[in-house]
Image (spheres, rainbow, N blue to C red):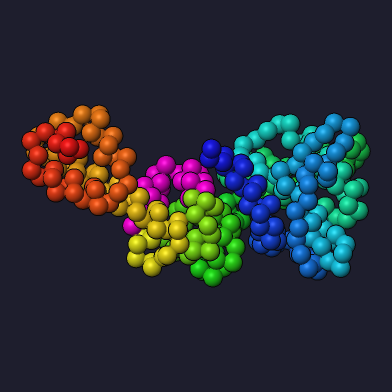
Amino acid sequence: MPSTPHEVVIDMFTERPQLVASLLAALGYELPDYETVEPRSERAAVVAPTEYYADAVLAFRRGGSTVLAVVVEVQLRPDHDKPWSWPVYTTSLRARMKCPVLLLVVCPDRRTAQWAAKPLEIGFGNPPTTVTPLVLDPSTVPVVTDPQVATELPELAVLSAVAHPHHPDHTRIWMALAASFRTLGADPALRYHDFILTMLPRAVRPAWEAFMSTGLRDYNFTSDFARKYIAEGEAKGEAKSILTVLDARGIAVSDHVRDAITSCDDLDQLQKWLRRALEVVEAEELLA
């Protein structure tokens, strides 16, 4: 079953912890000296009388000690319960790991980001004690057009493609992202492709699909994902051509024949059908 956008972004941080360092730097946060960034159990980090679960918890480590912990929350829309639970994540983690803690909220749009950025009052007084989240909205995601940067951190390239669909260099962003797919297996590449397709504005999706089905062909890719995606694009094109020829000749196409044509991914077979589409009297003859 395909992952939801929320799950995909969480997986980005847990599978590639270094991503959080790049995003904090983009927000202008000065990181402490550290050697590694490691995921931590979100359950163990935030146990309280009522259990709360953060989306991801990442620990910046140096010399065997944790010098900074980051709670990452992926927020696709406002949720008025979160201002009550987010302080639990940070204070529980601070007590448990005995280090400074940041709350980073990742938002796909400015409306949600503006809501998430409000200081959270957790005490009484003048002024009251507050926790203020660091918020990553599309405008603060780095524009990744360098294939080498994208290859080193594919998840950052994915977020860049989603955050900047109307950027003047959006084609270069996509080319850098495509370069990163060479280092990924077919499964994560396809998962990221579907995530981008889901998150892009509806008007931009056809351009993304066209780029992935035709643009990759000229990029000399050899990865399983690229070969698979290009083949699928070619198969769709051949199937469309067959149906166009039959329609131009005034030949009716039954649902059975149409499904057989559009579901076929064998290019040799599709090309044979295309040639026969110029000669047959009935569409069913293609499948004979």
Q: Quadrant of residue 87?
A: top right
The x, y position of residue 191, in whole percent, is 52, 48
Identify which residue is drawn at 29% across, 40% down: 262
Using the image as rendered, state which of residue 182 and residue 175 is in the foreground: 182
Asked if one can make out residue 210 in the rendered structure from this viewpoint, the answer is no
Using the image as rendered, state which of residue 156 and residue 270 is in the foreground: 270
The x, y position of residue 198, in whole percent, is 48, 42
Q: Quadrant of residue 28?
A: bottom right
Q: How many marks?
A: 0
- Above or below residue 116? Residue 159 is below
- Above or below residue 244? Residue 39 is below
Asked if one can make out residue 147 in the rendered structure from this viewpoint, the answer is yes
Identify which residue is drawn at 74% across, 35% down: 82
The x, y position of residue 19, in whole percent, is 66, 59
Using the image as rendered, state which of residue 123 and residue 16 is in the foreground: 16
Identify which residue is drawn at 25% across, 52% down: 268
Identify which residue is drawn at 54% across, 52% down: 188
What predominant SS class does the magenta segment belong to?
helix
Q: Quadrant of the C terminus?
A: top left
Q: Is residue 188 in the magenta section?
A: no
Q: Is residue 201 in the magenta section?
A: yes
Q: Quadrant of residue 90?
A: top right
- Above or below residue 64? Residue 281 is above
Highlighted magenta segment, given as a residue range? 191-214
